[in-house]
Image (tube, grey):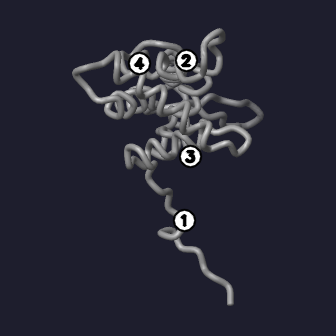
Amino acid sequence: MSKKFTASSQQLKPDPKYHSRLASKFINCLMLDGKKSTAQKVFYDALDIIGKKVEDAGALEVFEKAVNNVKPMIEVRSKRVGGASYQVPMQVSSKRQQSLAFRWILASARGKKGKPMCERLASELMDAYKEQGTAMTTRENVHRMAEANKAFAHFAW
């Protein structure tokens, strides 16, 4: 007898320390080669570093605000019309916004060298919280591209 999977049976469990689904999803994106315990240690160490630096807000609130700050509202997609490719600005779905925010934060943290990953991640999250840093620059570039190509918005499908 085969067991059918429903959307509720495949939902992501909250992380053990903060009981946050967002943190759990981020840990899974941070994980390399299936080493979840290592990813959790890096993430929790980064939040501990943030907690020591920021007294007014909790570390989890800083993380959530950083992710929300990096989320792009609009992006450009290639659309082929009559032999020419146009960069068409389009709205970004909420799922993709979260995915891109995670990807940009992790890419910028991994791009820095010379420090342990937990320190690099804490630094990037703090920068994103303050609306600065490499991940925010990436978001601004995406928004700038969409603004520059808004003349092609009528090609959106």
Identify the element where label 4 is drawn: helix
Q: Earlier in the sequence, mark 2 or mark 4?
A: 2
Looking at the image, the residue that sits furthest to the bottom is: 1
Looking at the image, the residue that sits furthest to the left is: 56
* Residue type, label 3: Trp
Residue at 45 percent across and 48 percent down: it is: 15
Q: Earlier in the sequence, mark 1 or mark 3?
A: 1
Mark 4 lies on residue: 126
Mark 1 lies on residue: 10
Residue at 59 percent across and 22 percent down: it is: 117
- The residues tagged by marks 2 and 1 sit, at their Cα atoms, a distance apart of 32 Å
89 or 8: which is nearer to us? Answer: 8
Contact flag, marks 1 and 3 (Cβ < 8 Å): no
Using the image, determine if residue 41 lies above or below residue 51.
below
Mark 3 lies on residue: 157
* Image position, residue 110 (x, y; %): 64, 21
136 or 79: which is nearer to us? Answer: 136
* Residue type, label 2: Arg
Crowdedness near tag 1: few (<14), some (14–19) or many (≥20) residues, C-alpha within 10 Å: few
- The residues tagged by marks 1 and 3 sit, at their Cα atoms, a distance apart of 31 Å
For residue 120, the mark is 2
* Residue type, label 4: Met
* Residue type, label 1: Gln
Contact flag, marks 2 and 1 (Cβ < 8 Å): no
* Image position, residue 16 (x, y; %): 44, 49
Using the image, determine if residue 134 lies above or below residue 41.
above
Looking at the image, the residue that sits furthest to the top is: 114
